[in-house]
Amino acid sequence: MSYFITNEQGKNEYGKIGKLRIQSTIHPAFSLILLGFCMIFLILSAWNFNNTINQAVNTHVLHLYSRQPLLHTVSDKFLSFGLDTSLLRDMKSLPIKDSKFINLARLLGPAYVRVGGTSADCLHFNQTKIVSEKVINPVDGQDISNFTINEIDFENLYNFATKSKLRMIFDLNVLIRNVNDSWNDVNAKNIISFAKNKGMTLDWQLGNEPNSFHHVFNRNVSATQLAHDYCHLRELLNEIGYNESLLVGPEVNHVEDTVHMGEQYAKTFLENDKNSVNYVTWHQYYLNGREAQLTDFINISIFNYLPKQIKSMQKAIISSGELIPMWLSETSTAYGGGAPKLSDRFVAGFLWLDKLGYSASTGVNVVTRQSLFGGNYAMIGSDLIPNPDWWVSIVYKKFVSEKVLKLSPISLEYLRLYAHCTPKKAWTGRVPAITIYGINLANFPVHVTIQGIPVFHKNAKVYLYALTSDKLQSRTIKINGELLKLESNGNLPPFRPIVLEPTEQISLPPYSMIFIIIHNAKVPACYT
Ligand SMILES: *[C@@H]1O[C@H](CO)[C@@H](O)[C@H](O)[C@H]1NC(C)=O
Ligand SMILES: *[C@@H]1O[C@H](CO)[C@@H](O)[C@H](O)[C@H]1NC(C)=O
Ligand SMILES: *[C@@H]1O[C@H](CO)[C@@H](O)[C@H](O)[C@H]1NC(C)=O
Ligand SMILES: *[C@@H]1O[C@H](CO)[C@@H](O)[C@H](O)[C@H]1NC(C)=O
Ligand SMILES: *[C@@H]1O[C@H](CO)[C@@H](O)[C@H](O)[C@H]1NC(C)=O
Ligand SMILES: *[C@@H]1O[C@H](CO)[C@@H](O)[C@H](O)[C@H]1NC(C)=O
């Protein structure tokens, strides 16, 4: 089926035909013959011309079948983010009361803010500060000493989430254990009861990366034992009045990695957890923050890790006999706090946006970015100025809804595109739209046309937003050539589109992240 059914002909062709008709009024009979020849010549040359153009500048055709059902509907908080529990070791340095920080977090909503990480299994809730001796993991230098937070700390954290209109997920300490190796729930009960008494609404987790405890804490908790602990926590939550809160786990890492076998741990966990978890959660990183190089961030082989890991995790879930959707509950470009001058720069946006697109296309329900603040992978710098990935996330929230569409596969490795319905808020004049977004990793412009989408009106338009930067390692990012900056009152600036006719070829700049909004697109799954 031809696309943009009401706009089959290009403007230029109409123009040429019009001119020929005017000439034909002079010598009707001769002109007709001439017109015939001219038409043939025109058609042939246009055909040749187009073919040449196609080869010279590489126009690639994208197909989107308009009558398709939705491929998936992900969470309305699909793009979420974390605040690492290690930040709670020094609450005074965490800007959760700063109105600028709250504004930046709020602009990313709706989202979950997951308070978790390695330090979650060191956290004790107590009014009196325990002063423990510093314990540093000899392998990665991580602080694994126990520490305390008190009621005021917990309340401040919760108030930050409320003011930012975020839903908090709190990761409880699973390493407080009884002599028979079962989880000791006393400290957790204090937190949960405190939260309930204050009327807080939030969701929960228990422990962090339990399949790697041996390497981090020199302790082991088996998948079967952890499953029992999760059942116990589910009961406790129900008793205390959090029966409507989510419980997610088991927070495994090292998926698709022969040594640690995160997916095997998750499988055994699911076989024993008696449906205690609402979502199966795991952690994903592409690179080691200490070793990662600029070239890794634009290397297609690195991008291809994620599909393999997701498939491996899906297989584990299916083989456990459970059908529970998954969350990437902690994920970023590089582990170990991110790669300096890379994970918080423009170039990190490619792996980030591709992860969002690919994950949604496979039905991953939530992707939690590590991290909103802190480390080299922060979306917001320590100066409270947004990093490029904060902007990428903002643009994503604006133009990409939770309704996922299927786009036919593209044969080019450097072009990775995905399709969703456009959120209602971004429609123009209550007319539905679809969004095609993704990345052009080529160092040259790539030209595309889109086929298969009928439109409602002749005045259908395509809006293009291209995110680029002067340097791959820049801390700034541009939209259609304009530097992205908050307005002085903290509001988002207007995003100015490049407006195209639906038939026009769309040019995607080199090293760009692109959002193509097709206003007036007739894709029933997006509006019925
Ligand atoms: C707080 O810590 C003290 C000293 O370690 C302990 O005796 C007390 O039981 C703890 N309180 C709570 C609520 O965990
Ligand atoms: C931290 O607390 C846990 C649970 O109470 C305890 O088992 C562990 O030994 C403590 N770790 C250190 C290094 O003190
Ligand atoms: C393990 O010990 C705890 C606390 O002493 C107890 O409540 C629990 O029932 C025990 N679990 C098993 C399986 O024996
Ligand atoms: C934990 O398990 C690993 C692998 O099964 C084993 O090598 C290690 O000795 C165990 N560690 C402890 C503290 O039990
Ligand atoms: C949670 O408990 C309340 C009160 O018992 C009940 O009304 C509600 O239906 C329960 N919700 C779920 C999801 O079980
Ligand atoms: C891309 O990454 C793969 C896998 O790590 C590596 O083998 C290859 O050499 C890298 N290519 C470039 C151009 O860096």
Image (cartoon, grey):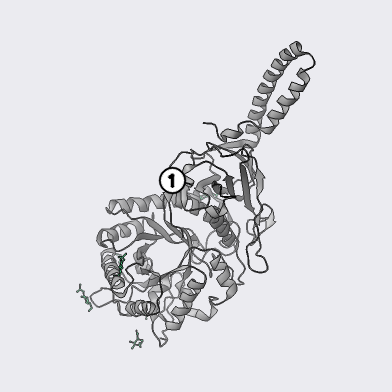
Residue 18 x/y as whole percent: 73, 26
Q: Is residue 320 found left or right of 438 in the rendered image? A: left
**Residue 417, horizontal then vertical, whole percent:** 53, 46
Name the residue rendered at 50%, 39% in the picture: 64
Taking the view exactly as shown, the residue that stands out farthest to the front is 429
* Residue 90, percent from left and from top: 50, 80
Specify few, some or many for label 1: CA neighbours under 10 Å numbering under 14, 14-19, or 20 or more.
some
The answer to whether one can see residue 13 in this image is yes
Q: Which residue is farthest top?
A: 29
**Residue 353 location, x and y as percent?**
53, 54
In the image, taking residue 10 as reference, residue 176 lies left or right, namely left
Residue 406 visible to an observer of this rendering: no
Residue located at (34% from left, 61% from top) = 278
User: In terms of image quadrants, where is residue 364?
Assistant: bottom left
The front one of 276 and 442 is 276
User: Would residue 184 appear left or right of 251 to someone viewing this image?
Assistant: left
Residue under label 1: 70
Mark 1 vs ligand 5: CB below 8 Å: no
Q: Residue 215: which quarter of the image?
A: bottom left
Please state which amino acid type lies under the numbered disc 1.
Leu
Residue positioned most to the bottom? 128
- Say which residue appears at 65% left-offset and 36% top-offset: 57
Total labels drawn:
1
SS at mark 1? loop
